[in-house]
Amino acid sequence: MKPYPQDTIAAIATPIGEGGIGIIRISGPDSLKILQKLLKITKRPTSHRVYYSKMFHVKHFWDKAPRSYTGEDVAEVHCHGGVGVLRAILSQIVGLGARLAERGEFTKRAFLNGKIDLAQAEAVLGLIKGKSGIFVEQSTRQLKGHLSEKINALYDRAIALIAAIEASIDFSDEIGSVSPRRLEKEILGILKIIDSYLATAEAGKILREGVRTAIIGAPNVGKSTLLNVLLGEERAIVTKHPGTTRDTLEEQLSIGDVVLKITDTAGIREAVCEIEKAGIERAKSEIDRADLILFVLDASSKISRQEKVLLGKLKGRAVIIVANKIDLGVRGLAGKEIGRVVKVSLINGKGVGGLKRVILKVVLGKGIANDADVILLTARHKECLLRAKESLSRGLQSIKIKQPVDLLTIDLRDAAAALGEVTGKAVTEQVLDKVFGEFCVGK
């Protein structure tokens, strides 16, 4: 890993644009000196106290290390939120000896100084990017150290096994060997917990990226109208002519605490031209990728052969049958064996509230809940736990085929390293660059 940086960094910490308040953050050994020179402060300010300065009409404070976000001396200037003001002040700060911060560098320094571990640092990013209450709640728990505590417990168990094996080898006369049964039982216990965490990875992906939702069905059944109704605005073109939607249209919306990345697709039928054919192929691709499918049917008409075939292909998927046009009468509903059937009239809004409740119920049934003990919120955590599981599984196999017990410590060390990577106990510079490269400048 690179040597710890000894310089002082600065950045605008609030979004660029017009706003009531703008914040510039400074961190490093020269933070106080730069703040005093910038605002012509002659008397040394007290740490953790807010002051007002007539220079730029700002409020400012200084936090003495190590009682700060980064663990270094940190200063902040709170000024008017205009772009020109912020950039002018930042330019002066750089002129006084600070360097422009890189993406996530303040939080990276907090990690390097032991203020937070890597899982907690990623939780900060989750709070910045979180679009749903559940994701924010889980990120808050992670920032408080809940995930780290669970992973560290598994790490400690792996290390304890290594110590027991090595002690039994070094002091075999005094303490004897560790029984294969005990080793197997302990490894199986760790694997069981890892599997329970990995089972939440899909929920974490949905919380992180949103529920990928495809609106599908035959032409002119109300797919684009459904998108517009859910969005609350006229986003998709709606006409009486079938085949109006010839490409996919993606939008994002929230229903309760769930974010949907919803795609309106071309009506699936025998294409009448090459353009429509391409749109239908894209629609089929969206169906394959979707976490949730809203299959729109015309409740006033009999289901077609093509619709029956498509319904049959969706067995085992998360599907909601949206039976539209009930204002024109209902001629029998299909698809009950495939998914929940919700009767609606999108033209007058009847049943839309019930549809939203069903969407929430189906999505929350994927293991997404505020009270979940642990949800893996990042793909990196999943990858680390998969590697730990693989190493422990190899260790189990070595016990079963009665290999020398000292070889088991190799697999246990690999498992511990993978677990340690979640919290940053053992991590490369490349991993850190990737994690903190996802942050904005100023955080």
Image: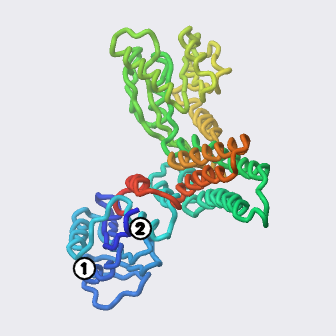
Residue 136, position as x, y percentages in the image: 53, 54
- Callout 1 amino acid: Leu
Above or below, comparing residue 234 to residue 380 in the picture: above
Q: How many marks?
A: 2
- Callout 2 amino acid: Arg
The residue tagged 1 is: 38
The residue lying furthest to the front in this view is 173
State the separation of the CA atoms marked 1 and 2.
24 Å
Q: Report the residue at 69% width, 49% height from top.
A: 404
Q: Report the residue at 34% width, 68% height from top.
A: 23
Above or below, comparing residue 426 to residue 337 in the picture: below
Crowding at label 1, few (<14), some or many (≥20) Cα neighbours within 10 Å?
A: some
Q: Report the residue at 73% width, 44% height from top.
A: 402
Quadrant housing the C terminus:
bottom left
Residue 132, position as x, y percentages in the image: 52, 49
The residue tagged 2 is: 109
The mark that comes first in sequence, 1 or 2, is 1
Q: Secondary structure at mark 1?
A: helix
